[in-house]
Amino acid sequence: MKVVVIGGTGLIGSKLVRRLAGEGHEAVAASPRTGVDTVTGEGLAEALEGAQVVVDVSNSPSFERGAVLEFFETSTRNLLAAEAAAGVGHHVALSVVGTERMPDNGYFAAKIAQERLIEKSGLPYSLVHATQFFEFVRSIADESAAGGEVRIAPVLFRPVAGDDVAAALARVALGAPLNGRTEVAGPEQYRMDEFFRDALAGLGDPREVVADEHARYFGSELTERSLVPGDDAALGRTTYQEWAAGQ
């Protein structure tokens, strides 16, 4: 099966391409680095020729509210139109658990807009909502830092390994379209402040983690379940401790 991975040279995309190729599929890594640009449309028709499935794990180069919305709307429209022309039978997109709970967040609002375009496209599709990746622990802490402290809301948190997200995407891509969504998360649930306190200590990061119920997550105030999936989420196998030991 030919599967084109949009954003296929990034963190999740490269893992997915390796996994699909290892299972004997023709996995194409499509990104500006390989001559495929979903914003301009450059190289898109050629990349999709003969593809049965497209998996979109691309991300905006800017998280500014207007820029990220323009990226996801433009790239998704271009991609869906190219897929329709090429006869692609399954569109898979990676999104984030909790998008609909934080519409005031510019990034999440852009992901909601992307999902609406996919749902209304008429193409068979699957949406995979993932929780936060282990690989982003330090960047989340940096975003939450102020004056030598890392201020984190004491809410539920269930991060996941990038490899487990790639495995979930592969399963969905090779299966029948869901025409709906599925969720993927890590095997263990934490209090977010406790997780970051332990994780930063393990990284040798001396910053103090302060529990603050009003601490913002990339601009949004969190409620207890803002970032965690429902009870029927697929759970990855890799714990944070196992992942960290392998780094």
Image (tube, rainbow, N blue to C red):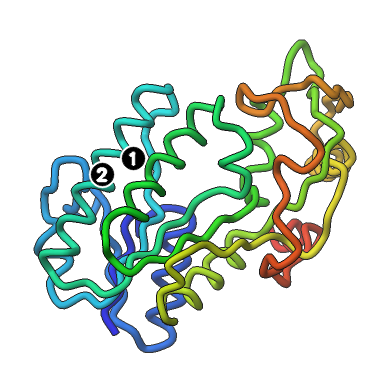
Residue 82 coordinates in the image, percent (x, y): 15, 58
Q: Position of residue 191 (x, y in %)?
A: 87, 43
Name which residue lies at 67% across and 37% down. 138
Query: At label 2, which amino acid type do we have?
Result: Ser
Q: Quick one: quadrant of the C terminus?
A: bottom right
Quarter of the figure that contains the N terminus: bottom left
Q: Is residue 115 left or right of residue 1?
A: right
Q: Residue at x 27, y 53 (%)?
A: 31
- Distance from disc 2 to disc 1, alpha carbons, whole Å, reads 5 Å
Judged left or right of residue 84, residue 175 is right
In this orientation, which residue lies closer to the viewer: 85 or 137? 85
Where 109 falls versus 18 (above or below)? Answer: above
Circles 2 and 1 in contact, beta carbons < 8 Å: yes
Element class at badge 1:
helix
Q: Position of residue 77 (x, y in %)?
A: 23, 47
Q: Residue furthest bottom?
A: 24
Where is mark 1, residue-wise?
72
Residue at 55% x, 71% y: name it.
Answer: 168
Q: Which residue is mark 2?
A: 75
Residue at 86% x, 49% y is: 190
Label 2 CA crowd tier, 10 Å (few <14, some 14–19, many 20+): many
Instruction: Provide residue 150's location: percent of width, then percent of height.
Output: 79, 24
The amino acid on which the numbered mark 1 sits, given as a three-letter code, is Phe
